[in-house]
Every structure is written in structure tokens, then in C-alpha cells.
Image (cartoon, rainbow, N blue to C red):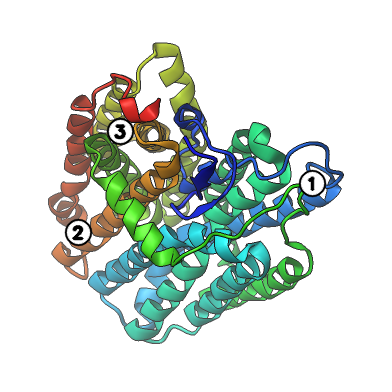
């Protein structure tokens, strides 16, 4: 490898070359590979110090906050549908707009951070989510709701990538996996806790007032980001060069090279199927199918939260099990098969006790943790300069599939859907997960020459 490598999204920059095998400890997000850029060497008083922790806490707070808004859609969408006189098809389409815009923009977010730095981009991202929350609160028709979802998605696409970027810069490559793993854990726990908390809050506030409160918090967070978030100064004698050339052209070039790798495509399919199903169940269909089964709204929300809690537990375990087994595809295969089974049981069991429901919803999230191996596989089979592009492809496919699994069933459902209607429309979700499991079987585990 040369002395010049690429950023996590494929943009060339002056940095120490990264061995491709470093991708093996990937947490599964494109932002992971920002941390492998060892831009800062030697002792520097701010790396890992109090300022680093402050900035990491702010980045983590941003991720948890935006996840609360995103997953809270499952709770407030029935009220929005009623008050804004929308159809269930429009509610599902609005949810999918978020995921599609997110998938598109996140391909470019890391490159923009590399070129312009976290200040002011991260503060602008927080501001976008804040504006989206206020638009969300003002929803009176489908146009307003769709616009709110698009604005929210633009800002949110910088959340995980930004947390990874800041973690890599402020704590260095050695601690990056740990720090970003903690971000993901808090985000998943926030989703698990957030839905029941939002539901409880709605006993005292309208959904509009709740979303305004989210927006007000965003204003405060935006100010804090402008005031405190920045890159650490490089160590004495280290010169950090800005990437040269057209950033968008570089991204598209490297995305094309990564996408030409068959194993990247297969990894994208398995990860997209698993996480896309989790996203569809965890943000929209989980509460709806449970309510159709006769569950109270409170209990249905708790069940959906359990799915996110399961993901918080399962995601970090996926790579641990994979490393123990010495295999990537087999843990992914078994996880996807069991996830598909759990989803099918939730949809098609004629009777379901509360205990079974609790177990199955946790299992859906827990086995969805297997999607992380798709990112690991993609990172290991491309040269170091393309690991970010490969991860961006996988991450983008995850959200595209999630959007499709939200919008397609919604077009098949009547406005007043019962359990039989949901069972007729939601068959696509477990089938897609099975397709992901089959794709994993075709992934060769031979060490590729490009990874050397």
C-alpha cells in the first residue's frame, strides 16, 4: 500500500495506510473506518482527555436523540394518521421516505466530514434534525410529514458517521471500536427505553407538544455543538492534508469499485435483509401487528422496545461469536434463519401469550445483530482504501431495504386493517430475511488477495 489512503467514504487524503484486516473488528457502520485513520500520533494532551469525553458525550447524545425521534414514529404515527386524516399507506410511505433519504445522503456524509471537518458540519446536522422535529410537530397533511421526514433524514445521516469520525479523532484507532460500540449500545438502549417513555409522556402531552419538546432540545444541542465540537489539534510535526479533487466524483468512483466485488454484494444482501426487517418491525409494524392481535397499546410498545433491546445485546455478540467460530457466513446464516423464524411466528401464530410475545420480539432484535457481520465481511474483502466505500454500500442497502419493507406492505393494507390483513401483507418481511440467509451461503471464506 502507498502512504496515501482514502477516507472512510473513499475520499483520498494524507494518512497512514490501513491494513485491510483491521476491518475484522468492524462494528458494522461506515464510520468505523474513520477510526482506523491514524492521523494523530504520539502524546497529545487533548487526545482521550476531558475535552474528548465531552465531545464524545455530545455525539452520543445526538445519536440517542435522533434514534428516539426515529423509533418514536411507531408510537405517534397512529395519532398523526388520525389528526392529519392520512391513510396507512401514506404513513408507511412517509416512514420509507426517511430511510431512502438517509440511505442516499449517508453515502456522502463521511466524505463531507473528511473535507470540511466536524465544525460546523455536525452542528448543521443537529440543526437539520431540529428543524425536522418542528416540521414533524406541525404535520397537517402528507406533504408536511414527508418534508419533515426528509429533513430529519439529512441531519440524521451524519449521526453515526459523525460519532465514528469524532471517536476516531479524539480517542485514536486503538480505542475507536470500543468507543463506537458504546455509541451503538446507547443508541439501541435509547430506542428500547424511548418508545415506552414516549408513550407514557403522551398521557400528559399531545404528540405535537412532545415533538416541539424534541425540537427545543435540538436547539440547545445545536448551540453546544457549535460551541464545543471540533477536531483535536494534530501533534507537533504532523501535517494533516485536506483531501484533493472532487469529493463526489471520488466517492462514486470508489463505490463502483467496491460494488464490483461479489462478496460485498452478498454481504449487502444479508445485512440489508436482516437490518431492513428489524427497522420495519422496530419502527412501524411491530406495534401494529401486536395491536391487531389484541394487545394494549402500552404492551405493544413495550414489545417493540424489547426488539431494540435485543439488538443492543445481539449486535456486539455477532463478531465475538464469529471470531470464536472462525467463520463469518455461518453465524450470519444461523442468525438470519432464526430471525426469520421469530418474525414469522409473531405474524402467523393464531394465539400468542404475553410471555411468548416478549420472547419473540426480543429474539427478532437479538438475531438481527447478525447483520453486523455483513459489514465485517465487506470490510475484509476489499483493499484498505475501499473499506469505507464497501461499508457505505452495505449501510445504504440496509436502509433501502428497510424503506421497502415499510412502504410495500403499507400499500397492500386497507385503512382499517385487522390481523388477517396484516398476515396477508407482511409475509414479505420473513421471506426477505430468508433470502438474506441464502445469500450468506454463497459467501466464500477464503482470504481474498485484495485483503492482503
Looking at marks 2 and 1 on the same chain, the residue that comes earlier in the sequence is marked by: 1
Q: Which marked residue is nearer to the observer: mark 2 or mark 1?
A: 1
Is 213 positioned to the left or the right of 110 in the image?
A: right
Looking at marks 3 and 2 on the same chain, the residue that comes earlier in the sequence is marked by: 3
Q: Which element is circle 2 on? A: helix
Q: Are marks 3 and 1 in contact (CB under 8 Å)?
A: no
Q: Residue at x 19, y 61 (%)?
A: 408
Residue 346 screen position, x and y as percent: 28, 40
In this view, the residue in front, 300 or 438, is 438
Q: Is residue 206 visible?
A: no
Is 399 positioned to the left or the right of 49 in the image?
A: left
Is 452 positioned to the left or the right of 427 in the image?
A: right
* 381 relative to 34, above or below: above
Provide the residue designation for mark 1: 235
Residue 278 screen position, x and y as percent: 35, 45
Provide the residue designation for mark 2: 409
Q: Quadrant location of the C terminus?
A: top left
Label 2 neighbourhood size at 10 Å, few (<14), some (14-19), many (20+)? many
Q: CA distance from mark 2 to mark 1?
A: 54 Å
Q: Which element is circle 1 on? A: loop
Asked where in the image residue 178 lies, by quadrant, the reply is: top right
Provide the residue designation for mark 3: 339
Amino acid at each position: 500500500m502507498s502512504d496515501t489512503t482514502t477516507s472512510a467514504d473513499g475520499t483520498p487524503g494524507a494518512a497512514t495506510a490501513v491494513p485491510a484486516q483491521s476491518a475484522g473488528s468492524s462494528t458494522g457502520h461506515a464510520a468505523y473506518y474513520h477510526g482506523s485513520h491514524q492521523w494523530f500520533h504520539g502524546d497529545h494532551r487533548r487526545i482521550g482527555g476531558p475535552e474528548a469525553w465531552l465531545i464524545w458525550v455530545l455525539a452520543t447524545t445526538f445519536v440517542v436523540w435522533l434514534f428516539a425521534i426515529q423509533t418514536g414514529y411507531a408510537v405517534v404515527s397512529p395519532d398523526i394518521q388520525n389528526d392529519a386524516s392520512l391513510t396507512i399507506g401514506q404513513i408507511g410511505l412517509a416512514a420509507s421516505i426517511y430511510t431512502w433519504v438517509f440511505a442516499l445522503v449517508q453515502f456522502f456524509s463521511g466524505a463531507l466530514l473528511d473535507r470540511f471537518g466536524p465544525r460546523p458540519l455536525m452542528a448543521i446536522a443537529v440543526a437539520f434534525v431540529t428543524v425536522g422535529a418542528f416540521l414533524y410537530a406541525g404535520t397537517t397533511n402528507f406533504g408536511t410529514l414527508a418534508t419533515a421526514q426528509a429533513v430529519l433524514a439529512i441531519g440524521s445521516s451524519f449521526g453515526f458517521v459523525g460519532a465514528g469520525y469524532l471517536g476516531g479523532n479524539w480517542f485514536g484507532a486503538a480505542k475507536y471500536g470500543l468507543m463506537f460500540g458504546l455509541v451503538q449500545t446507547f443508541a439501541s438502549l435509547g430506542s428500547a427505553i424511548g418508545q415506552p417513555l414516549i408513550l407514557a409522556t403522551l398521557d400528559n402531552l399531545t404528540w405535537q407538544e412532545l415533538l416541539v419538546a424534541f425540537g427545543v432540545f435540538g436547539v440547545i444541542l445545536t448551540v453546544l455543538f457549535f460551541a464545543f465540537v471540533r477536531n483535536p489539534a494534530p501533534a507537533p510535526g504532523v501535517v494533516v492534508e485536506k483531501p484533493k479533487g472532487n469529493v463526489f466524483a471520488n466517492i462514486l468512483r470508489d463505490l463502483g469499485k467496491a460494488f464490483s466485488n461479489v462478496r460485498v454484494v452478498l454481504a449487502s444482501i444479508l445485512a440489508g435483509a436482516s437490518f431492513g426487517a428489524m427497522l420495519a418491525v422496530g419502527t412501524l409494524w411491530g406495534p401494529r401487528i401486536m395491536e391487531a392481535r389484541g394487545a394494549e397499546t402500552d404492551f405493544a410498545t413495550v414489545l417493540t422496545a424489547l426488539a431494540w433491546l435485543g439488538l443492543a445485546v445481539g449486535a456486539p455478540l455477532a463478531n465475538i461469536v464469529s471470531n470464536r467460530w472462525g467463520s463469518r457466513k455461518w453465524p450470519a446464516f444461523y442468525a438470519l434463519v432464526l430471525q426469520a423464524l421469530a418474525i414469522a411466528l409473531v405474524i402467523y401464530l393464531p394465539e400468542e401469550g404475553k410471555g411468548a410475545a416478549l420472547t419473540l420480539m426480543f429474539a427478532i432484535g437479538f438475531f438481527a445483530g447478525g447483520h453486523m457481520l455483513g459489514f465485517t465481511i465487506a470490510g475484509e474483502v476489499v483493499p484498505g482504501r475501499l473499506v469505507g466505500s464497501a461499508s457505505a454500500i452495505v449501510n445504504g442497502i440496509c436502509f433501502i431495504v428497510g424503506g421497502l419493507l415499510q412502504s410495500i406492505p403499507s400499500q397492500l393494507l386497507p385503512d382499517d386493517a385487522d390481523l388477517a390483513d396484516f398476515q396477508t401483507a407482511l409475509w414479505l418481511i420473513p421471506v426477505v430475511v430468508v433470502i438474506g440467509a441464502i445469500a450468506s451461503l454463497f459467501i466464500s471464506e477464503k482470504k481474498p488477495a485484495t485483503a492482503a
